[in-house]
């Protein structure tokens, strides 16, 4: 079932839910959407699966600029409130990449309705004020309608995807909606910090997932986060990289299923 939820600032959020049981809310990464967690979610049993498209990612609405993580955390809280009001229990939150950072911000702000977090490689050390100059270049490219170039800039200098992986991957789309979405994520990342100690206030159990082939500084950020969190479990797949949620969805789903304590 797909519905539209209104965020605190009035932005429309597309929300899709299926199944029954304790709610699990999935938060996608940059340039994702309702489809992003589909391969994992279809293998998760015994829960109500809730996926939403983050603001600035179709079919959700475009929010005000500049974007930041506090706004996105408020969106996630709105989704959680909607499903927990109906379920009468806390929601488990699953996030990947940028979506994992959104989940951390939401839990740090208020974890009263959050039962647990399952996070795949939040890119914590990729954020920071050093991105301000990259954001200026990104906006210049978008103003010139050079959307593919803007997205390539995001992938290479924000996500820091190695050139050989970019070259082997799919062609970068010349898409204004995709550029708007990535640009909003870049805005939030440029306004964020890298202090791992702030996550020590997250007082729920956290599953940290990672790939053994992911590029620096993703592993370093996961290590710092693991040291800061008071309640953490970990799982790593030596043959996977930052795209494990789509490349190995059954393994990711199995890890989440075990973490939630329900049979697969």
Image (spheres, rainbow, N blue to C red):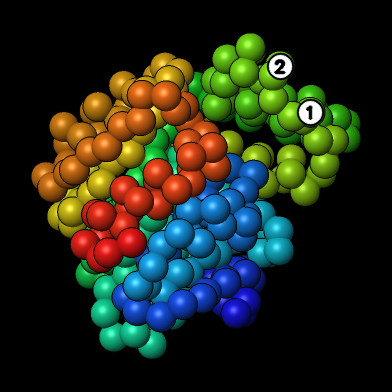
**Tally of marks:** 2
Q: Is residue 179 positioned above or below 106 on the image? A: above
Q: Is residue 157 positioned above or below 127 on the image? A: above
Residue visible at 74% across and 44% down in the picture: 178
- Which quadrant of the view contains residue 170? top right
- Within 10 Å of disc 2 (Cα), the crowding (few <14, some 14-19, many 20+) is few
Residue visible at 29% across and 85% down in the picture: 88
Residues at marks 2 and 1, CA–CA distance in whole angstroms: 8 Å
Residue visible at 26% across and 79% down in the picture: 89
Residue 171, numbered circle: 1
Residue 14 shows up from this direction: yes
Quadrant where the image shows the N terminus = bottom right
Residue 258 picture location, percent across and down: 25, 55
Q: Which residue is mark 2?
A: 167
- Which quadrant of the view contains residue 264? bottom left
Residue 81 picture location, percent across and down: 38, 77
Residue 66 shows up from this direction: no
Outermost residue to the right = 145
Residue 44 picture location, percent across and down: 41, 62
Outermost residue to the front = 264
Q: Is residue 235 positioned above or below 141 on the image? A: below
Q: Find numbered disc 1 in the image and state the secondary structure of the residue it sits on.
A: loop
Q: Is residue 215 positioned above or below 1 on the image? A: above
Residue 43, numbered circle: none
- Front-lying residue, 248 or 171: 248
């Amino acid at each position: 079932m797909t519905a539209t939820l209104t965020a605190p600032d009035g932005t429309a959020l597309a929300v899709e839910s299926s199944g029954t049981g304790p709610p699990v809310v999935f938060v996608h990464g940059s340039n994702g959407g309702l489809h992003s967690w589909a391969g994992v979610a279809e293998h998760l049993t015994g829960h109500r699966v809730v996926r939403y498209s983050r603001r600035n990612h179709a079919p959700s609405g475009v929010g005000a600029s500049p974007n930041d993580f506090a706004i996105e955390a408020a969106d996630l809280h709105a989704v959680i409130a909607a499903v927990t009001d109906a379920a009468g229990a806390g929601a488990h939150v699953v996030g990947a990449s940028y979506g994992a950072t959104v989940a951390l911000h939401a839990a740090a702000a208020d974890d009263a309705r959050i039962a647990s977090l399952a996070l795949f490689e939040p890119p914590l050390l990729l954020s920071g004020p050093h991105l301000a100059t990259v954001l200026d270049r990104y906006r210049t490219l978008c103003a010139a309608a050079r959307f593919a170039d803007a997205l390539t800039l995001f992938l290479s200098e924000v996500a820091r995807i190695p050139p050989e992986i970019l070259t082997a991957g799919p062609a970068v789309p010349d898409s204004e909606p995709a550029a708007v979405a990535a640009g909003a994520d870049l805005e939030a990342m440029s306004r964020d910090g890298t202090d791992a100690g702030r996550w020590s206030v997250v007082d729920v159990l956290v599953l940290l997932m990672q790939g053994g082939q992911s590029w620096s500084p993703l592993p370093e950020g996961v290590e710092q986060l693991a040291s800061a969190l008071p309640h953490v479990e970990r799982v790593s797949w030596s043959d996977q990289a930052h795209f494990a949620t789509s490349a190995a969805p059954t393994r990711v789903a199995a890890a989440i299923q075990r973490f939630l304590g329900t049979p697969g």
